[in-house]
Amino acid sequence: ATSDPDGDAVTVSWWPFETYGTYAGTVTLERADGPTTGVRIPADAAPGQTIHVVAEATDHGTLALTRYARAVVTVR
């Protein structure tokens, strides 16, 4: 969930952080914008490999601020 202390609207974007993680292939997200997304684990991903996904949240205030959070998915 996202919120802004000033009550401004917040936009969330998601993207695979392909520079990091041990899985070297292409990762597909269910959606690139919105409060949630899903990660499609590629068929060739091996157990133990990691995929990093970033959430980028930006408020729509006079001075727009952005915060980033990273999720690390470990393939089973």
Image: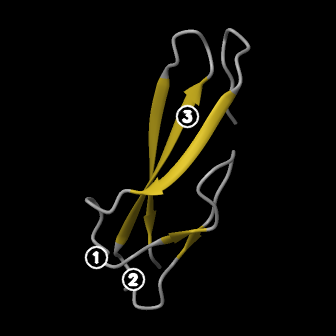
Circle 1: residue type: Ala
Q: Secondary structure at mark 3?
A: strand
Give the mark count.
Answer: 3
Q: CA distance from mark 1 to mark 3?
A: 26 Å
* Relative vertical location of residue 58 with respect to residue 15 in this rendering, above or below: above
Q: Which residue is mark 3?
A: 57
Residue at x 63% of width, y 67% of height: 30
- Label 3 neighbourhood size at 10 Å, few (<14), some (14-19), many (20+)? many
Does the CB distance between marks 1 and 3 fall below 8 Å? no
Q: Which residue is mark 1?
A: 24
Residue 15 in the image: state x and y as whole percent.
47, 55
* Relative vertical location of residue 36 with respect to residue 41 in this rendering, above or below: above
Q: Look at discs 2 and 1 and give the one toward the viewer.
A: 1
Residue 63 in the image: state x and y as whole percent.
51, 11
- Sequence order check, earlier mark of 1 and 3: 1
Does the CB distance between marks 2 and 1 fall below 8 Å? no
Residue at x 55% of width, y 29% of height: 58
Q: CA distance from mark 2 to mark 1?
A: 13 Å
**Is 55 left, or right, of 5 in this rendering?**
left
Q: Secondary structure at mark 2?
A: loop
Of the pair 47 and 38, the residue shown nearer to us: 38
**Is 53 left, or right, of 25 in this rendering?**
right
Q: Which residue is mark 2?
A: 47
